[in-house]
Image (cartoon, grey):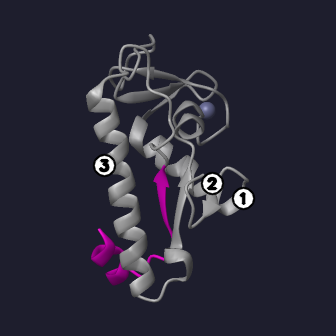
Amino acid sequence: MVWFCEEHEVKTIVFENLKNYSALSGFKDLSWNLTANLFSKVFETVRYMRRSMGHKYGGVWTVSPAWTSQTCHQCGEIGIRVSDEISTSEMKRGEFFYCVECDEHFHADINASRNIIHVQQKKMSSAVPGRLA
Ligand SMILES: [Zn+2]
């Protein structure tokens, strides 16, 4: 990932911060702790590698995952997660995001990624450069 970003002259990498994210009920088990620890390892490694390549603070940011996955990147309204591209009934942790306001479906990861770009452009306080927010 770091080499890909270097090749494409990516200045800033933004992660969803999974370290302090409270686990969903029924998920407070060992596998969740492993996920959080793995996230920290990946994040620290990426930051270390980026720093060694001359990027200030590593050029690595984190944002709150709660904020990025619930909001429509197009209009800013709170949307719901659904199972597929045509469904409009809520399904927790569904693969797609549906916004009632726009009446549009987006893949949940794409919607979250576009929200992350907006956070960075607006320099909102939820993103802290080079640190775990
Ligand atoms: Zn919308």
Compare residues 18 and 78 and report the one nearer the observer.
18
Q: Residue furthest top?
A: 89
Neighbour tally class for label 2: few under 14, some 14-19, many 20 plus, Cα within 10 Å: some
Q: Position of residue 57 (x, y in %)?
A: 55, 76
Neighbour tally class for label 3: few under 14, some 14-19, many 20 plus, Cα within 10 Å: some
Q: Amino acid at mark 1?
A: Lys
Label disc, if present, on residue 38 of the rendered structure: 3
Label disc, if present, on residue 118 of the rendered structure: 2
Query: Does residue 50 belong to the magenta stretch?
Result: no
CB atoms of marks 2 and 1 within 8 Å: yes
Compare residues 44 and 13 and report the one nearer the observer.
44
Q: Position of residue 43 (x, y in %)?
A: 40, 60
**Residue 8 image-quadrant placement:** bottom left
Say which residue label 1 marks: 122
Quarter placement of the N terminus: bottom left
Identify the element where label 3 is drawn: helix
Neighbour tally class for label 1: few under 14, some 14-19, many 20 plus, Cα within 10 Å: few
Q: Which residues are magenta?
A: 1-16
- Residue at 36% x, 81% y is 6
Q: Amino acid at mark 3?
A: Leu
Query: Does residue 6 belong to the magenta stretch?
Result: yes
- Mark 1 and mark 3: Cα distance apart in space: 29 Å
Identify the element where label 2 is drawn: helix
Q: Residue furthest bottom?
A: 54
